[in-house]
Image (cartoon, rainbow, N blue to C red):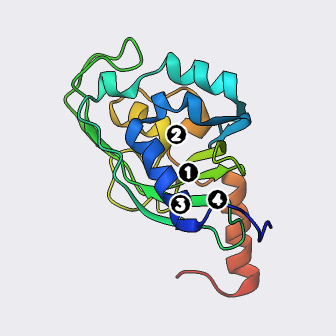
């Protein structure tokens, strides 16, 4: 905890908004040398890995009308160098997505996702976190998924690994939940 962080909360929120308005693809000059990109199952990616990844993957080609719908900006009271915000992306699939997925016309509606930018004392982004779904049952057609996984799933081209699929209770978890109901005497009826 750095109680003497030199950038005020209002300035941090303004800086975050500046970067987001330019777009994630235009943030190279805003990144610290020790930058990390972190998603729920992706990363951490270092600066060069991140820049390479976003340079080869442009979501707006597949979803030219995409709106990220950022809101609820706030500075973390425990990490005064970190700005948290929420995003609820929506967009219609009218262009080729990921280089080969032909337009479906599907309007993708994502659930709310927590995101953050953490800054160094010079105002550079040292960490960017994305895609942490806050409520998978909120209005969406992504199977409750966030980040890029949401877009692949919604247009009918889910990625071929469990982390890119909607949450499903495992047999082991179902077993332990059942034991809890039997021996704990509680649970839903």
Q: Between tags 2 and 1, which lies in front?
A: 2
Residue drawn at the location 47% of the way across and 56% of the way down: 14
Asked if the residue under mark 1 is in contact with the one under mark 3, i.e. CB atoms within 8 Å, the reply is no
* Residue 95 place in picture, x, y as percent: 25, 20
Q: Between tags 2 and 4, which lies in front?
A: 4
Estimate the spatial distance between the alpha carbons at disc 2 and disc 4, rounded to whole Å: 30 Å
Estimate the spatial distance between the alpha carbons at disc 2 and disc 1, rounded to whole Å: 8 Å
Relative side of 62 to 163, left or right: left
Residue denoted by label 3: 11
Disc on the earlier residue, 3 or 4: 3
Residue denoted by label 4: 82
Estimate the spatial distance between the alpha carbons at disc 2 and disc 3, rounded to whole Å: 38 Å
Q: Between tags 3 and 4, which lies in front?
A: 3
Relative side of 29 to 38, left or right: left
Estimate the spatial distance between the alpha carbons at disc 3 and disc 4, rounded to whole Å: 12 Å
Please identify the quarter of the rendering in which residue 49 is found.
Answer: top right
Q: Is residue 129 visible to the viewer in this orientation of the structure?
A: yes
Bin the neighbour count of mark 2 within 10 Å (Cα to Cα): few under 14, some 14-19, many 20 and up: some
Bin the neighbour count of mark 3 within 10 Å (Cα to Cα): few under 14, some 14-19, many 20 and up: few
Tag of residue 165:
2
Estimate the spatial distance between the alpha carbons at disc 1 and disc 4, rounded to whole Å: 32 Å
**SS at mark 3 in the image:** helix
Asked if the residue under mark 4 is in contact with the one under mark 2, i.e. CB atoms within 8 Å, the reply is no
Asked if the residue under mark 1 is in contact with the one under mark 2, i.e. CB atoms within 8 Å, the reply is yes
Residue drawn at the location 29% of the way across and 37% of the way down: 66
Which of 153/131 is in front? 131
Residue drawn at the location 33% of the way across and 47% of the way down: 141
Asked if residue 188 is positioned above or below residue 60 in the image, the reply reads below
Residue denoted by label 1: 168
Disc on the earlier residue, 1 or 4: 4
Asked if residue 75 is positioned above or below residue 187 in the image, the reply reads above
């Amino acid at each position: 905890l750095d109680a003497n962080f030199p950038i005020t909360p209002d300035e941090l929120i303004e800086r975050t908004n500046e970067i987001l308005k330019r777009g994630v693809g235009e943030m190279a000059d805003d990144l610290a040398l020790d930058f990390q990109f972190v998603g729920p199952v992706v990363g951490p990616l270092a600066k060069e890995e991140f820049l390479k990844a976003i340079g080869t993957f442009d979501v707006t080609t597949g979803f030219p009308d995409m709106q990220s719908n950022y809101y609820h900006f706030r500075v973390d009271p425990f990490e005064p160098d970190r700005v948290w915000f929420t995003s609820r992306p929506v967009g219609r699939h009218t262009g080729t997505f990921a280089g080969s997925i032909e337009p479906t016309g599907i309007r993708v509606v994502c659930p709310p996702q927590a995101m953050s930018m953490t800054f160094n004392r010079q105002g550079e982004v040292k960490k960017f976190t994305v895609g942490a779904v806050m409520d998978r049952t909120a209005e969406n057609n992504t199977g409750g998924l966030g980040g890029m996984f949401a877009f692949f799933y919604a247009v009918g081209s889910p990625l071929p690994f469990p982390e890119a699929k909607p949450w499903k209770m495992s047999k082991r978890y179902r077993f332990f939940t059942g034991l809890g109901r039997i021996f704990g005497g509680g649970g839903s009826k």
